[in-house]
Amino acid sequence: MDQARCKDPCLRIDPKIGHTQIATCCFKITNKHLKYNILGLGDAARYMSNEEGLKKDGITDEQLQEKIPQHLRYASVYWANHFEVADIEDTGLMNGLEKFVDEHTLHWFEVLSLIGNLDSAHRAIRAVMKLLKSTSSDLHRLLSDALRFISKFYGMINRSALHTYHSALPFSPTDSLLYRRYIKEARHNIFGIEGGPKKWDALVAILSHGEGVDAIKFSLESALLVSFSESEEYVNNGMSNPGKLKIWDAAMGTPISTITGHTFAFTDDFSTVASSLDNIITYYNVNGSAGGMLTTPSTIHKLALSESSRVAAVLSDGTVWLWDSRNAELICSFDGFKTIGWSWLEFSRTGSRLAYSSAIGVTLRDGISGRFIADLPCEKTHKLFSDDGSRIVSLSLSYYGGLALWNTESGGLVDAVRDVDAQHHLAISANGSLLATADEYKVTLWSENRDHLAKIEVLEIQDTWSMAFSVDNLLAIGTEDSGIKLYNTNTHSFISTLSFTGFPVALAFSPDGAHVACGNTDGNMHLWDMQGIDASSPLSKKPTRITAMALSRDCSQLACAFADGTVELWETSPTKCRTASRWCDRVSAVGFGPDGRLFASGSDDGTIKLWNVGDVSLYGTLIASGGLEAVALSGGVLVAAGKDGVTLWSLDTLSLIHTLKASRLPSGSLMSSTISDDSDLAAIAFDKGVHLVDVMNGTTAIATFTVSYGIRKLTFLPDKTQLVAQIYNGDFQSFNLINNSIANGPTLEHLIQLPDTPLWHGVPVWLCWASGEHYVAALFPQHQTPVPVLWIPSDISVMAWAQGSSMIALGCDDGRIILLRLRTSHLG
């Protein structure tokens, strides 16, 4: 609007009025057309990935355009752009927004996923939340929930739009307003979920880097997060397998760009990323678009990039080169780079210093001119700059090594401590005043005061893999089995433990202290919001891991075994714990009889206790072979299988029928066992084969089947013509007991006969595991391959599971029990 150019007020267009009208129109379009399953996908297709579902139901590009026309696409993607500059006092606009958020948020996510624009959801929600005056209104709460929802389940929804309802919604916190408003959309789902989370926790998202994470770093303003894995094979062995760098939104955990190369470097604001391939450096912006290039005389082994427009590279001949990154002008080059222990090339955060590995330990130079400053004698060490660049800390890896702190202004030694045991990990606070070292059994804290290093505290923590300080001196300690421990160095107390699986090799706080991120060797990263951590509540004890589970055949009873030796018996309708008993160090196996009147629990030492389900009284105690791995019950016989052999017991007399010594059985790890209901046949699964046992004669020579994958569960068909094996990844093999043939893959004819396989209107469903994810698969008629109908969120670490005719029970690493209960209605 330019009043000087347009004198007639009737012809002027006020931008605020125009954007208000367009935003209001966008809401009218979305509120009219958005709905569940907008494409009308069928039973199998709705659970598939977007691409596979469209192909399955034969939806063409023209049909997709018809069902999601251009005006609906525009309204879904760009409504927030207009809302940001609209008049939020306009009643029609706000009524449209409230209806949209209250009734169509999940439908909106569905459409954005289908048209490939799910990334725009985060920006739109955050833009609206900034404009809302009341943070206590239902509208603000719904938007806040929606932001957490799309962050946590982004990968799941981006892959398959309708899993917004089938997988993400049922695992949302039950106390959240979004769950309460939208759970009606779950009426289409196969399962109802019991035991899921009640509130949003500190976990923002689980990110997939795709391969082992070498390092994680936040941008200086804390808005972005980078993860990268450099090609160490290339550096050390001359191989050409590239690495990967990913840039993420640090608040929401959504991906921004992916850059490949052998080595990487980036400025503190991530505005420039340098990637090397052979002898070429390529510059990229934050969105992954390539810019300039620089060619070096030989292959690049290390890269560093500074805020002062400098790029440094270590070349294959051991020289270090320094250029002006703006014009590729060579400033200087120097000899002397040498890898002893960990190779290192890094600018200080301000760019005023450049440090690299050399024969003496570390060479320190001016980061602008390359002028030599000092050699720091610290061989075979970890080395780190403090965030403010004022200090370098080094930690020797030798048994009688040392911890040293250096002043980067002059390169002078501040102080050193000798004989620091065999410390393996190192962290330094932002200003260099606090240090942390870790070995296999403890973490030691050090303080620098008046140029003197002093040991101030020792924390008894085992198996530390990584550490990081926050700006306010909170120490995060990544452990192998106990998650990420947060220690307040000011109050000398642990404030929380963040659940994490795998080896936490990369750990970092954002500079503002608002987020912490950790990556593992499997390529997964966890991103947490520190505001979601209640540091005032008492630190909870380490949860007890569930080690084994079993459901009675009618699913009315659930037996759970825990790592501390506790056994619990649960009723499932309604869900409540009937009893708990602790009687050994670790329970390794549980199982029910076919009529559900008895259940057995067995420990590692071979002790088996039999319980009456009715009054939970002890029926008897058996002493089987040691190293017990599996128990199976028929109407009259119990099979106990362990590392030392297999024993068969009469359930009537509690007497031993047969013993099959380990020497008579094939070598390898024992996986599973089963017995037919009539006590005639038993089967034992090892990692390389399945062996049938004649129960009456105690012989194993009836039949042997060779397998290539570990078997989790064995089940006889009722007529005993087939033995069906479920493999650990969820696939199946069927062993024909008539002609000794093997059929691979799930067979609908067999699955519907298995007493422990849930059937949803004749469709068999079962739990699977693949590529680090658990999911429930279904085999639909007229579709040859299983389809994932429910994805289990990756932050739920499933350690044990059981399934029966009407439900699947999940036992988690944190001791939780989650029930997936089949729905009885079928809304197609």
Image (tube, rainbow, N blue to C red):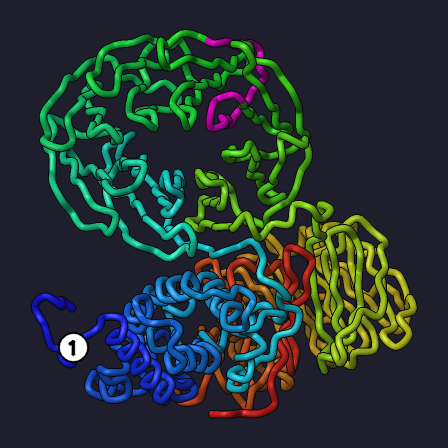
Where is 297 relative to 524, above or below? above
Q: Is residue 419 magenta?
A: yes
Q: Position of residue 184 (x, y in %)?
A: 55, 84
The amino acid on which the numbered mark 1 sits, given as a three-letter code, is Pro
**Is label 1 in a helix, a strand or a loop?**
helix
Where is 29 relative to 817, above or below? below
Q: Position of residue 645 (x, y in %)?
A: 71, 55
Closer-to-camera residue (559/645) = 559
Q: Residue at x 60, y 81 (%)?
A: 758
| 516 displayed left or right of 70 | right
Q: Position of residue 164 (x, y in %)?
A: 45, 74
Q: Residue at x 52, y 33 (%)?
A: 469
Q: Which residue is mark 1?
A: 9
Closer-to-camera residue (360/117) = 117
Q: Is residue 611 magenta?
A: no
The crowd level at tag 1 (other Cα within 10 Å; few <14, some 14-19, many 20+) is few
| 550 displayed left or right of 37 | right
Q: Residue at x 28, y 36 (%)?
A: 267
Q: Residue at x 51, y 83 (%)?
A: 185
Q: Quadrant of residue 521?
A: top left
| 516 displayed left or right of 291 | right
Q: Is residue 750 shown to the viewer in this render? A: no
Q: Position of residue 134 (x, y in %)?
A: 51, 66
Q: How many marks?
A: 1
Closer-to-camera residue (667/425) = 425
The residue range painted magenta reads 414-433
Q: Quadrant of residue 187?
A: bottom right
Is the N terminus in the top left, top right, bottom left or bottom right quadrant? bottom left
